[in-house]
Image (tube, helix red, strand yellow):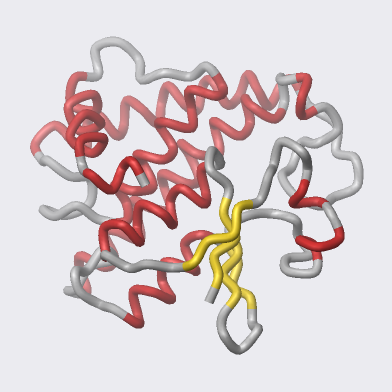
Amino acid sequence: MKLYDAAWAPSPRRVRIYLAEKGIEVDRVPVDLRSDEHLGAAFLAINPRGVVPALELDSGEVLCESSAICRYFEALQPAPSLFGESALDIARIESWTRRIEQEGYAAVVYVLRNQREAFRDRGVAGKWPAIPQIPELAERGGILWAAFSTALDAQLATRAWIATDAYSFADITALVTIDFAKAARLAVPEGLGNLRRWHAAASARSSAAA
């Protein structure tokens, strides 16, 4: 199988960190986003949506979406578990992963895609007709980011990791989101010591460099 990857994009990084935590090796095919290789005919034949990552199986079937790819590998190699083992832990990890995606990651995308010149008429990632920027969405993203960061800091007040007692896919998702926020010039607000402590611990894991 082959993983179509991009070095600096957040979604492929989420898969790389997950694979590193699991100790899984997969052949990788780099896709140059800066030159719009993901929008060229060759890659669109792999994923018509024009986004990475994409996992091409030996059968020729292609799986897209970073969380779906990680779920696939979790089913193949359950240990060590990153999606939870008990029913309650599975639910906790899923709940926080969705919240991080819908509040934190969405906030970064709102800001990044609606104010940077590089994304003019590219308000949504991938192969789409021209989608204009909406400045109000960038403003909304900044408000959402501050609220999300505060909520995550509160969650980490009495625990080392976000969803359960163990490092999980929710932590991977949050690490990628917070690091990606730098591209939108969003930072963890001052005074959120719990979140900063957690970020230092997550960043110190060897998988964070994947």
The structure residue drawn at horizontal position 19% and vertical position 69%, both measured from the top left corner, is: 80
At a point 48% along the width and 22% down the height, the residue shown is: 182
Residue 159 higher or lower than 71, as above or below: above
| Residue extending furthest toward the bottom | 59
Q: Nearer the viewer, residue 16 or 140?
A: 16
Q: Position of residue 138 (x, y in %)?
A: 65, 22
- How many marks can you see? 0
Q: Is residue 97 left or right of residue 122?
A: left
Task: Report the residue that reaches farthest toward the top.
Answer: 190
Q: Residue at x 68, y 54 (%)?
A: 51
In this view of the protein, which residue sits in the foreground, 55 or 185? 55
Residue at figure coordinates x 42%, y 31% from the top left: 179
Q: Residue furthest right?
A: 129
Image x and y of residue 160, in percent: 12, 41
Expressed as whole percent of the image width and height from the top left, the position of residue 72 reads 43, 76
| Residue 60: x %, y % from top left | 65, 84
Q: Give above or below for 18 relative to 101.
A: below
